[in-house]
Image (cartoon, rainbow, N blue to C red):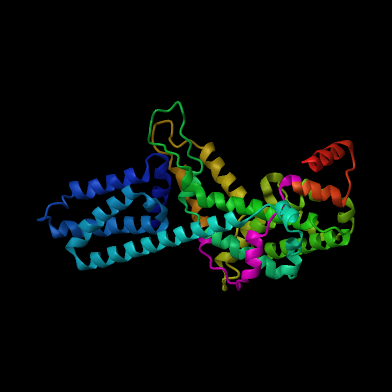
Amino acid sequence: MRTYIFTFLLSSRLFIHPYELMSKVCHLCVDQQRLTDPQADKARVRKIAPKILQLLTEWTETFPYDFRDERMMKSLKELTHRLSTGDELYRKAVQQMTQTLIRKLTTLSQYEEALAKINSSVTDRLTVLKTKPQSIQRDILTICSDPFTLAQQLTHIELERLSYIGPEEFVQAFVQKDPLDNDKRCFSDHKKASNLEAYVEWFNRLSYLVATEICMPVKKKHRARVIEFFIDVARECFNIGNFNSLMAIITGMNMSPVSRLKKTWGKVKTAKFDILEHQMDPSSNFYNYRTALRGATQRSITAHSSREKIVIPFFSLLIKDIYFLNEGCANRLPNGHVNLEKFWELAKQVMEFMTWKKVECPFDRDRKILQYLLTAPVFSEDALYLASYESEGPENNMEKDRWKSLRCV
């Protein structure tokens, strides 16, 4: 029953706005079941109340963000008021459900405020270099020289960001109203996928941080040491089951300003990096990664410790899979019926994600390292190229022209 309710609440938003659905549920209970009637038969209330409570509990627990809409809250209050007037048992259940919902929404608001604060404090690294050359002397190796510890702190950030993504964000990120379609039932609300977007931005930030840390040192042997350090961090992320940080690190290392540093790479033992790249190789639709993900998922199911439960998927690929499932299959069958098979599959993929995001991070937090990872200034793409050319000069005319134009800025 829970799976059915989850599938229904997830996919219904492709056809109807949650507040309209809630309004219909409210109307159905209050009017059709005549719960407005003070003489309403208690037996009738007892018959319908458990079912409505189950729906509302599931809705508020799994899709709490729907209730940031005042219209949703209004309907919820009306419905719960009707249910709790008749029986002490239902009154307690309603009270508990409402308190849990308010707690979740408060936590979400605090998280969003913290994110906004972090984002406002992040500055471009080149600007900082120009204004305060000494303040930038800190680098990742002075903050944390142990790859395992850094991988653990990255896992903290990943699991925290994952935990705030609502299942509905996967659907709402892709719902686009067809301009030729006058049917207003489909809706698009970009604000509703904000936690998902913040998580994608974190991936990009980590990639740029890795590239910045590699391009910044003046000496070749220091750059090589930073590369080897990140290779070890990436390997630890793989062992933990943190595939998102792993892929972000590989992406940072494969950025052109980093990959062109041939003399630096010549000093690096790349065998471990080659193995990691092989694991995340995009060929055959990321076959190697998907095999490793299945292994981590299996380990998580049979886990005895919270450390073994960690599965952090390569998030961009998860979104891509859900996007293609949504785009590749019609919402309705040729006979006009809803395509239930598509929505079962969609719910199955999102439910698996829901299991992963509930895992508590078992590692100790290190505030200094977390602060650095989240707020250390990073180079823009142009600044990365500039640092890269200054470390190892341009090799061809195209690079020379680019260097010249960057130095004029």
Q: Is residue 1 visible?
A: no
In this image, 130 relative to 170: left or right?
A: right
Whether residue 155 is in magenta: the answer is no
Q: Quadrant of residue 148?
A: bottom right
Q: Nearer the viewer, residue 136 or 110?
A: 136
Q: Quadrant of residue 363?
A: bottom right
Q: Is residue 49 visible?
A: yes
- Which quarter of the rendered picture does the C terminus lie within? top right
Q: Which residues are magenta?
A: 355-382
Q: Nearer the viewer, residue 244 or 366?
A: 366
Considering every residue shown, the one lying at the far top of the view is 180
Residue visible at 57% across and 73% down in the picture: 305
Q: Nearer the viewer, residue 373 or 234?
A: 373
Considering every residue shown, the one lying at the far left of the view is 39
**Residue 113: image location, x then y, percent:** 49, 58
Residue visible at 43% across and 31% down in the picture: 334
In this view, 320 is above or below 54: above
In this image, 44 relative to 154: left or right?
A: left
Considering every residue shown, the one lying at the far front of the view is 131
